[in-house]
Amino acid sequence: MPEIKKILCAVDFAEYSPQIAAYAQTLGKAFKAEIQVIYVAPTLAHYIGFQVAPSSIENFVGEIISGAEETMDKFLKENFSEAQVSGKVLTGYAAEEIQDFADSNSMDLIVMGTHGRKGIDRILFGSVAEKVVKGAKMPVLTLRPKSVDEDKS
């Protein structure tokens, strides 16, 4: 039977991220596994050359990362009281960074949410979760969390 000792929990700090964290924490407790939570900030590198100074973009990305690190610390304290957990903020394209991190850190399982995009949004933006599922070398647990509106019904 495969062992699950290292769980990667990928979040985007959206309203449903605590639900994703709850699943990761439950699995971490059940398997006595360590949990690594990651957030991937965009690089904004594709804006270089659009009459925006590269130094301005670098400063903006630096501010995003700094804010994301503070948000990560708060997120871990609020959502992982019962698990061995650490957090990391990465930059780049989310699907690629999640897969690279999982591979380079020998993760046994990836836990992440889906946005449930439909129609033109799905065509234009694709699905990070779908890309990770297709490219990951380890199992991926995808969760379609309930929105606040769904909880009220």
Image (spheres, rainbow, N blue to C red):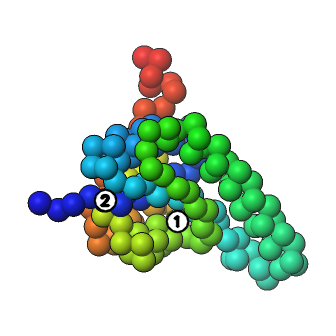
Quadrant of res 140: bottom left
Position of residue 38 measured from the top left corner of the image (x, y, whole percent): 53, 59
Label 1–label 2 contact, CB within 8 A: no
Residue sitting at 55 percent across and 57 percent down?
87
How far across and down, in percent of the image, does residue 76 sit? 56, 45
From the viewer's side, name the closer residue of 18 and 114: 18
Give the quadrant of residue 106: bottom left
Residue 48, percent across and down? Answer: 77, 80
Is residue 103 visible to the viewer in this orientation of the structure?
yes
- 148 is higher (above) or lower (below) than 56: above
Badge 1 marks a residue whose secondary structure is helix
- Dot 2 lies on which element? loop
Checking the image for residue 128, the label placed there is none
Residue at position x 47%, y 58% in the image: 36
Camera-nearest residue between 119 and 34: 34
User: Is 96 situated above or below 144?
Assistant: below
Q: Position of residue 108 (x, y in %)?
A: 30, 64
> Distance from label 1 to label 2 (Cα)?
23 Å
Residue at 65% in and 43% down: 74
Which residue is the site of mark 2? 5
Left/right placement of residue 11 relative to residue 22 reads right
- The residue under the point 42% across, 72% down is 105
- Between residue 96 and residue 38, name the one nearer to us: 38
Of tags 1 and 2, the one toward the viewer is: 2
The residue under label 1 is: 94
Label 1 packing within 10 angstroms: few (<14), some (14-19), many (20+) = many
Q: Residue furthest bottom?
A: 49
Q: Amino acid at mark 1?
A: Ala
